[in-house]
Image: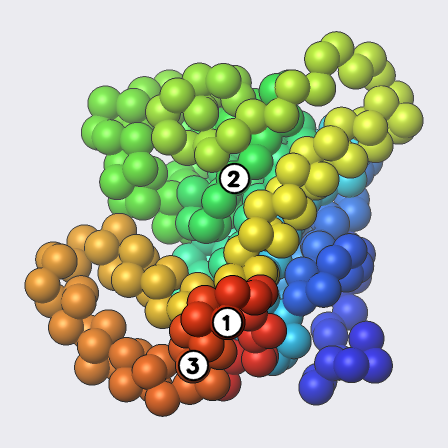
């Protein structure tokens, strides 16, 4: 931590660790509440992802949960209390512009991988839909059960889900509220890969074993990303996001060229990458200045 340019936020309901160079691991830490996120939790995570984007030494974030859940959504007890206090008016849980968990509508610069160790419902699913990659335990389940509680998934999932899995599958998830298993989610393209955790049993030790396997795989992928040019990763990610958000190929390419490419070509890392290729050695990347 002493190597950081700025010190990290201290979220109340999440723990931070740095398992490999350039990688931030965030673990949601309300296992008895299935890692449901409170109003303060949204603000804390928003600040954390902003710190990831601005801290030069970090290149990839990984998000997971402690216990048997990744995140079961909003803190409905808190939400019910707010609604009751408002005499039945349309009270909602306050959120930053980045949405649920600071991730569901995040426009950030650096990639975030979700390591889904178990239950992933409501806002949890909204977060993984807008993350960059998703690694899931074979026991993981996904769902948007908001309709069963009289509410709607308004943190950004609905328009993004249809772009990922198609209209009919999106309609099935949001109108029925049914849970989708990890294997089916992988088939639909909602998950990148599934880690077989067998039948881990019950209890804290079993949950920890599952989380360890899933996080190890996520960190392996994060390490591959962190090993690439941080400048090229940022610009490449932006290009994919522009297309996913519905901008045409020509317009998206023009935006990349106008906004990023000149800075990319004038940076240290493109020179280092080309020189390392010529010299047949591994590149030594500088922290991105883009």
- Distance, label 1 to label 2, CA atoms, is 35 Å
In the image, 198: left or right of 188? right
Q: Which residue is mark 1?
A: 279
Q: Mark 1 and 2 residues: CB-CB less than 8 Å, in contact?
A: no
Please tell me which residue lies in front, 180 or 152. Answer: 180
Percent of width and height locating residue 278: 44, 71
Please tell me which residue lies in front, 186 or 97. Answer: 186
Percent of width and height locating residue 186: 44, 25
Q: Mark 2 and 3 residues: CB-CB less than 8 Å, in contact?
A: no
Rendered residue at 73%/75% (across/down): 8
Percent of width and height locating residue 50: 56, 73
Q: Earlier in the sequence, mark 2 or mark 3?
A: 2
Instruction: Tell me the SS state at disc 3.
Output: helix
Q: Which residue is mark 3?
A: 271
Residue 134 circle label: 2
Percent of width and height locating residue 126: 46, 43
Above or below, 275 against 39 in this view is below
Instruction: Tell me the SS state at disc 2.
Output: strand
Rendered residue at 74%/81% (across/down): 4
């Amino acid at each position: 931590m002493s190597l950081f340019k700025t010190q990290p936020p201290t979220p109340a309901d999440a723990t931070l660790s740095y398992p490999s160079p350039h990688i931030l691991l965030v673990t949601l830490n309300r296992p008895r509440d299935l890692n449901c996120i409170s109003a303060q939790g949204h603000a804390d995570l928003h600040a954390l992802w902003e710190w990831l984007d601005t801290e030069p030494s970090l290149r990839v974030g990984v998000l997971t949960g402690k216990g048997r859940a990744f995140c079961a959504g909003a803190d409905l007890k808190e939400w019910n209390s707010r609604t009751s206090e408002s005499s039945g008016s349309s009270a909602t849980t306050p959120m930053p512009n980045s949405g649920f968990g600071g991730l569901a509508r995040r426009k950030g610069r650096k990639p975030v991988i979700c390591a889904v160790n178990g239950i992933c419902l409501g806002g949890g699913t909204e977060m993984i839909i807008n993350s960059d990659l998703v690694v899931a335990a074979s026991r993981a389940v996904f769902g948007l059960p908001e309709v069963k509680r009289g509410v709607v998934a308004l943190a950004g999932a609905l328009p993004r889900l249809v772009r990922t899995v198609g209209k009919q599958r999106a309609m099935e998830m949001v109108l029925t509220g049914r849970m989708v298993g990890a294997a089916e989610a992988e088939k639909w393209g909602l998950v990148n890969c599934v880690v077989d955790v067998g039948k881990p049993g019950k209890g804290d030790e079993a949950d920890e074993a599952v989380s360890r396997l899933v996080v190890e795989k996520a960190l392996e992928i994060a390490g591959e990303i962190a090993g690439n040019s941080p400048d090229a990763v940022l610009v490449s990610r932006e290009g994919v996001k522009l297309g996913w958000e519905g901008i045409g190929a020509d317009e998206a390419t023009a935006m990349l060229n106008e906004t990023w490419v000149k800075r990319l070509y004038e940076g240290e890392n493109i020179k280092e990458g080309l020189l390392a290729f010529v010299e047949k050695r591994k590149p030594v990347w500088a922290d991105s200045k883009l």
